[in-house]
Amino acid sequence: MGFLRIIGWCLQFVTNGFSLQSIQLGTSRFRATKAATQIVLNVPETKVSSLENGLRVASEDSGLSTCTVGLWIDAGSRYENEKNNGTAHFLEHMAFKGTKKRSQLDLELEIENMGAHLNAYTSREQTVYYAKAFSKDLPRAVEILADIIQNSTLGEAEIERERGVILREMQEVETNLQEVVFDYLHATAYQNTTLGRTILGPTENIKSINRNDLVEYITTHYKGPRIVLAAAGGVSHDELLDLANYHFGNLPSTQEGGIPALPPCKFTGSEIRIRDDKMPLAHIAIAVEAVGWSHPDTIPLMVANTLIGNWDRSFGGGVNLSSKLAQITCHGNLCHSFQSFNTCYTDTGLWGLYMVCEPSTVQDMMHFVQREWIRLCTSVTESEVSRATNLLKTNMLLQLDGSTPICEDIGRQMLCYNRRIPIPELEARIEAIDAQTIRDICTKYIYDKCPAIAAVGPIEQLPDYNRIHSGMYWLRD
């Protein structure tokens, strides 16, 4: 039941700030677009309602025999302070350890007997609890979710047992170098802010968090206006709304002092280097400050992210890939893999690239990454952008395969935009992006900006920070 962070491409869309542009379509592209439009017309409507206490209910009924239903809560590690950092994730672990009416064993048996699946995860801004079950068991699934977030016993014995589980999880995360590097990247990019802290929290906090900390976090953050009950698959919206009223209608709408304000998190161009020459490969992330979920520049940055792409030695055919950086990387044997990412939060974001290199190729790889970034600012072509927009639309649709990813998309978008943006609208916004837009947006966020850098391993050849910064506006061939 551990935490989950999805780094790289994810469904992050905007609510305003676009204009449709006329696009010359070739015959084949016109046919593909017409076919896609016909498919989209068959997508069920996402219905949205609100309870009196502010809790939102959103669902999409696709008539399946299974469904996914979950609670998306606007509360994660960003709402913690230095002393209680790790509480949101600790609380997620405690959710399945028993309630006032179900012991842990009773809960596990009930879920297994239903043939259902129950899970949860914590991110920097959200906590999620969800269940996948037969559509006929939707009422039981909702009742179980309501029980675990409102009636968990948070027993002292269970808390002590989970300390050990979380500490072991921390050790496992420390062996995942991509996780380590991204934690360092946040730590340096958002210094002395809540986004700079890890989701799991420091070891000393895990050892000291107690029942009162957990209860206080629930009391402060688990409020009606900050919760979305989302469902997808074979679900009736009216039935879901009735279940929400019955099980969540008594949740408080506000608390004394109102809803806590989101702590501001300022970006700082800086670096963290952890040199270890005993490691076989260097793991490096470089990023500039991007924008939040609802900013109008989000979609152009997503297209730019798709233009950079990702590559791994196991892919094969690298010299024939559409990504220019993948072609260069494959031809020059510059790295084992790279992955572009566009990570959005409410009011800020990180746009950049993560790479895994041999010690001898670190300098060259960094050079070509920055050269490609500058190329996006100056000379990206219409054909490249057209290919990237098509790929982005394809990825968007492929990621919505199944009730669970659809439910997750509904929950996340409801928290971020207070609505679910229709697919035709998203496609129209993506298609409106042209090469000039990419050049303008990349110049705005990349050119002459101070990046954040996190590097771990044999990184002797990584250029110093000032030299990397100079590569953000001038590169020598």
Image (cartoon, rainbow, N blue to C red):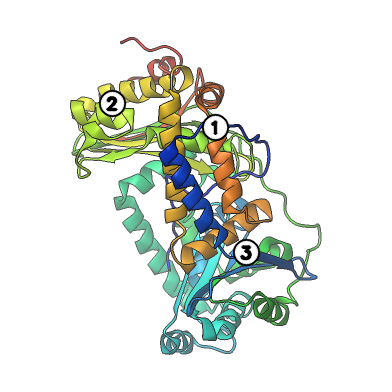
Say whether residue 358 is left or right of residue 259.
left
Say whether residue 40 is left or right of residue 20.
left
Relative image position of residue 177 (x, y in whole percent) = 31, 46
Relative image position of residue 421 (x, y in whole percent) = 62, 52
Q: Nearer the viewer, mark 3 or mark 2?
A: 3
Q: Are marks 3 and 2 in contact (CB under 8 Å)?
A: no
Q: Which residue is mark 2?
A: 365
Relative image position of residue 165 (x, y in whole percent) = 39, 68
Instruction: Say whether disc 3 or disc 2 marks the residue closer to the N-terminus.
Output: 3
- 10 Å crowding of disc 2: few (<14), some (14-19), many (20+): many
Hey, what amino acid is under mark 1? Ile
Q: Which residue is mark 3?
A: 45
Q: CA distance from mark 3 to mark 2?
A: 46 Å
Q: Nearer the viewer, mark 2 or mark 1?
A: 1
Hey, what amino acid is under mark 2? Met
Q: Which residue is mark 1?
A: 23
